[in-house]
Image (cartoon, rainbow, N blue to C red):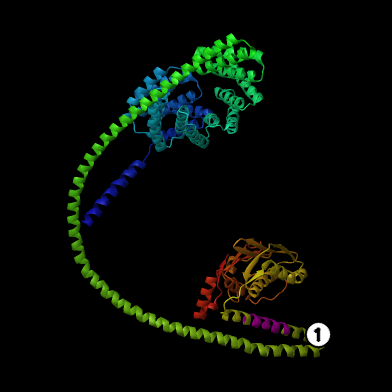
């Protein structure tokens, strides 16, 4: 059975490889189509940022190229991108003309998804040109094609457009469609339309006086538009956020937010968006009693609306100017703005502006003592307020009725879905039970066969393991005996080394003493020179023996460290003072950068480390150079480093840097002697102090030794190290710690 399954998998893999090889063979036409798709993708990304100049250049390139190769899909996509850019720029005539060409091409060569996108743009042109009935008919045609399209970006855009068209008549259904659109747009990764949907949900929440929810949706839209760099929509988001903040009583925050919208729109020139920002900002200043600022922005918005013949802007700003001039007691200027605003509001049947200007008219006449005119104006204002209230109540009733119908429809659909799910689950469960029974019988039979076969194998394996275990036990016993013998030999070696060092030391002292006596009695200069060479050799041998004795003593030392809190900076400063005279003889300057560090350490060990590293730096530095000493506090760790300007250490030398009697290719620059034990001792002592040492060096650029230590070592770890050291003395013969280079 297993063999058959493997054979089946191999056959499938072979077919997959053949398919991959076939799919990888691309002709020139495929490469051109790929390039055109990539350019269209760049155009769509530029469209999200409202980078219309780039959209124009990219779509022009695609249209020219796609006509030559007759790539209708790329040609249609490019035309639709260009149509969308015309829509965003409110270039209605050009957009509708190009859209007509695109629809003709789609009818002949296009896909359902492309047709839906074209119809969405067509409906948007209708709504923009105040043809709502025609726009709704176009969207109905697009909705009929929904079942033929799986592309989530297209479906999400369709749901968003349909929801936007029904916000006035059925806001509840519009909200439902908006959330369905968000799901599809999330799936497609479409950010620009998603930001528009969040903004529109905020507007619906604001209409229901839920300003907190509206503010949350506006901010979601703003975050997305910032992400894609869509500054035009950013300004709209800031404007809406400011309205929500103002409605929540946060007037100052609203004004600050509107200033951001103004700054963005001012860069783009005079536009309806900028004029709307001026009005909202002026209204906030009017509400907070900042009359001069309110007048400034109302007047600026009024003038710029006149400059581009933007009638809604003239109407709203004239109403605002009438209110602010009344508050500033410039009564003779108020009537002209009331008249302008009222005439435009009557033409568009804007009930809110009509109620506002009639109220201003009534208050003005009352203040001037024209009581009959004030009463007549008040009656007009009351009439429009009643109409507004009636419309609001009607909308609320329609909203409640729509919500109830939606809930009823949702409940019916849910009940039907549950019934279908129950039947489907029942049928699935019956099949699953039957399949499970058959599968259980087969698996049980296979397991029994496997168990009986494995029982015999297991007995053989156990017998083999038992024999191997006996062999391993014997080997372990031999290893323990060898370890004990090695420990004994190591102890004997250490004792012998100590005896040799001590036995060499005493005769050497005698030799040095006799040489000194002979030196006093000699008068011949050549003989004195020979004697001086002998004395130098004996002295070097004495230094080597002393260094060996020190290293041997440190290696045998197994006591627990007696750590104490010390001033590390003071210890290092004292060490530097001791080396100043030696450095001066070679005209070497010692530079210090020492921070204050208090840490737990062993002073004797630390002094040896510092002395060795500074001594080496001076020893291998050329005359008239510098040695840099640095001490840094790094929180739980502290770092000590010594940097010289010597010849540097090659990679070959670095490999044996910390070995006993390790010699470097570089030589001391002043004829100083080197025992080859200094860095060996340093590494061992750094390890004892639970530190790390590393080297930074390059040939011709000097060397830098860096030591890192804990400020307060782990006492439990120290106790464990002591226990291990006392149990196995051989472990202390090699330096501990880590060396990095």
Q: Is residue 438 left or right of residue 488?
A: left
Q: Which residue is drawn at 64% across and 65% down?
A: 640
In magenta stretch: residue 722: no
Residue in the picture at 53% in, 36% down = 226
The residue most toward the top is: 372
> What percent of the width, then of the height, locates residue 664?
63, 71
Please tell me in which quadrant of the rendered image residue 79 appears.
Answer: top left
Number of residues whose C-alpha sits closer than 10 Å to that of mark 1, classed few (under 14), some (14–19) or many (20 or more): few
Residue 28 shows in this picture: no
Q: In which quarter of the image is the N terminus?
A: bottom left
- Location of mark 1 (residue): 525
Residue 313, placed above or below residue 225: above
Tell me what residue is drawn at x 65 percent, y 24 percent. 291
- The location of residue 537, given as percent across then percent down, is 70, 83
What is the secondary structure assignment of the residue under circle 1?
Answer: helix
Count all numbered tags in the image, as a single digit. Answer: 1
Locate the C terminus and report the quarter of the image it occupies.
bottom right
Question: Is 367 on the left-hand or right-hand side of 420?
Answer: right
Along the line of sight, which residue is nearer the eye, 216 or 131?
216
Viewer-closest of 164 and 590: 164
Q: Where is residue 514 in the image (x, y as percent from the top left)?
A: 74, 90
Q: Please, which residue is most extreme toward the right here?
A: 523
Task: Name the magenta segment's main secondary structure.
Answer: helix
Q: Which one is in front, 336 or 310?
A: 336
Query: Where's residue 309, x and y in %?
Result: 57, 15
Q: Nearer the viewer, residue 506 or 619?
A: 506
665 vs 155: above or below: below
In the image, residue 557 sits, relative to residue 193, either above or below, namely: below
**Residue 210 shows up from this direction:** yes
Quadrant of the image occupied by residue 659: bottom right
Q: Range of the magenta residues?
A: 535-548
């Amino acid at each position: 059975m297993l063999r058959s399954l493997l054979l089946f998998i191999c056959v499938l893999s072979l077919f997959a490889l053949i398919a991959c090889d076939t799919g990888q063979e691309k002709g020139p036409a495929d490469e051109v189509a790929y390039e055109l798709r990539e350019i269209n993708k760049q155009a769509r990304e530029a469209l999200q940022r409202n980078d219309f100049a780039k959209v124009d250049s990219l779509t022009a390139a695609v249209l020219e190229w796609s006509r030559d190769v007759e790539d209708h899909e790329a040609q249609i996509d490019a035309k639709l991108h260009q149509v969308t850019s015309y829509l965003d720029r409110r270039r209605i005539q050009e957009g509708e003309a190009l859209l007509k060409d695109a629809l003709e091409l789609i009818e002949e060569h296009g896909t359902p998804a492309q047709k839906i996108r074209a119809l969405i743009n067509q409906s948007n042109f209708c709504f923009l040109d105040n043809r709502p009935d025609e726009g709704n008919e176009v969207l109905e045609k697009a909705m009929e094609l929904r079942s033929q399209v799986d592309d989530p970006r297209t479906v999400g855009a369709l749901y968003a457009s349909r929801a936007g068209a029904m916000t006035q008549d059925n806001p509840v259904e519009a909200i439902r469609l908006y959330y369905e659109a968000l799901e599809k747009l999330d799936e497609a990764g479409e950010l620009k339309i998603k930001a528009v949907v969040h903004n529109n949900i905020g507007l619906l929440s604001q209409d229901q006086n839920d300003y907190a929810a509206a503010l949350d949706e506006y901010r979601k839209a703003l975050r997305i538009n910032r992400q894609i760099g869509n500054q035009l929509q950013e300004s709209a988001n800031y404007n809406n956020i400011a309205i929500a903040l103002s409605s929540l009583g946060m007037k100052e925050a609203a004004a600050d937010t509107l200033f951001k919208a103004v700054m963005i729109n001012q860069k783009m020139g005079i536009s309806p968006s900028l004029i709307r920002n001026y009005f909202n900002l002026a209204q906030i200043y009017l509400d907070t009693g900042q009359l001069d600022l309110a007048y400034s922005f109302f007047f600026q918005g009024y003038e710029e609306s006149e400059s581009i013949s933007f009638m809604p802007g003239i109407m709203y700003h004239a109403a605002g100017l009438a209110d602010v001039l009344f508050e500033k007691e410039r009564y003779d200027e108020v009537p002209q703005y009331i008249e302008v605003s009222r005439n435009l509001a009557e033409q568009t049947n804007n009930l809110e502006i009509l109620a506002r200007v009639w109220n201003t008219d009534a208050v003005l006449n009352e203040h001037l003592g024209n009581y009959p005119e004030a009463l007549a104006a008040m009656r007009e204002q009351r009439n429009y307020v009643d109409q507004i209230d009636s419309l609001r109540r009607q909308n609320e009733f329609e909203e409640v009725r729509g919500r109830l119908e939606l809930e009823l429809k949702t409940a019916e659909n849910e009940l039907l879905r549950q019934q279908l799910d129950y039947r489907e689950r029942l049928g699935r469960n019956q099949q699953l039970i039957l399949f499970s029974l058959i599968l259980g019988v087969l698996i049980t039979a296979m397991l029994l066969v496997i168990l009986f076969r494995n029982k015999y194998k297991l007995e053989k394996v156990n017998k083999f393991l038992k024999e191997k275990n006996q062999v391993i036990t014997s080997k372990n016993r031999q290893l323990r005996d060898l370890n004990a013998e090695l420990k004994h030999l190591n102890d004997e070696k250490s004792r012998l080394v100590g005896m040799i060092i001590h036995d060499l030391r005493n005769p050497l002292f005698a030799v040095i003493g006799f040489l000194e006596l002979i030196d006093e009695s000699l008068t011949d200069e050549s003989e004195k020179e020979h004697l001086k060479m002998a004395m130098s050799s004996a002295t070097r041998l004495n230094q080597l023996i002393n260094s060996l004795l020190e290293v041997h003593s440190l290696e045998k030392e197994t006591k627990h460290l007696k750590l104490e809190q010390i001033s590390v900076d003071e210890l290092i400063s004292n060490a530097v003072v001791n080396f100043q005279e030696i450095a001066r003889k070679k005209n070497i300057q010692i530079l210090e950068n020492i921070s204050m560090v208090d840490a737990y350490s062993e002073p004797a060990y630390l002094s040896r480390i510092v002395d060795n590293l500074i001594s080496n730096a001076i020893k291998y530095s050329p005359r008239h150079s510098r040695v840099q000493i640095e001490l840094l506090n790094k929180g739980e760790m502290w770092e000590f480093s010594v940097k010289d300007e010597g010849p540097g250490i090659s990679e070959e030398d670095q490999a044996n840097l910390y070995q006993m009697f390790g010699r470097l290719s570089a030589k001391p620059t002043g004829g100083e002697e080197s025992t080859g034990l200094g860095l060996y001792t340093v590494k061992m002592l750094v390890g004892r102090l639970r530190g790390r040492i590393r080297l930074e060096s390059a040939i011709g650029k000097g060397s830098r030794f860096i030591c890192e230590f804990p400020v307060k070592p782990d006492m439990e770890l120290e106790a464990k190290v002591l226990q291990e050291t006392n149990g196995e003395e051989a472990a202390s013969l090699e330096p501990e710690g880590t060396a990095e280079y």
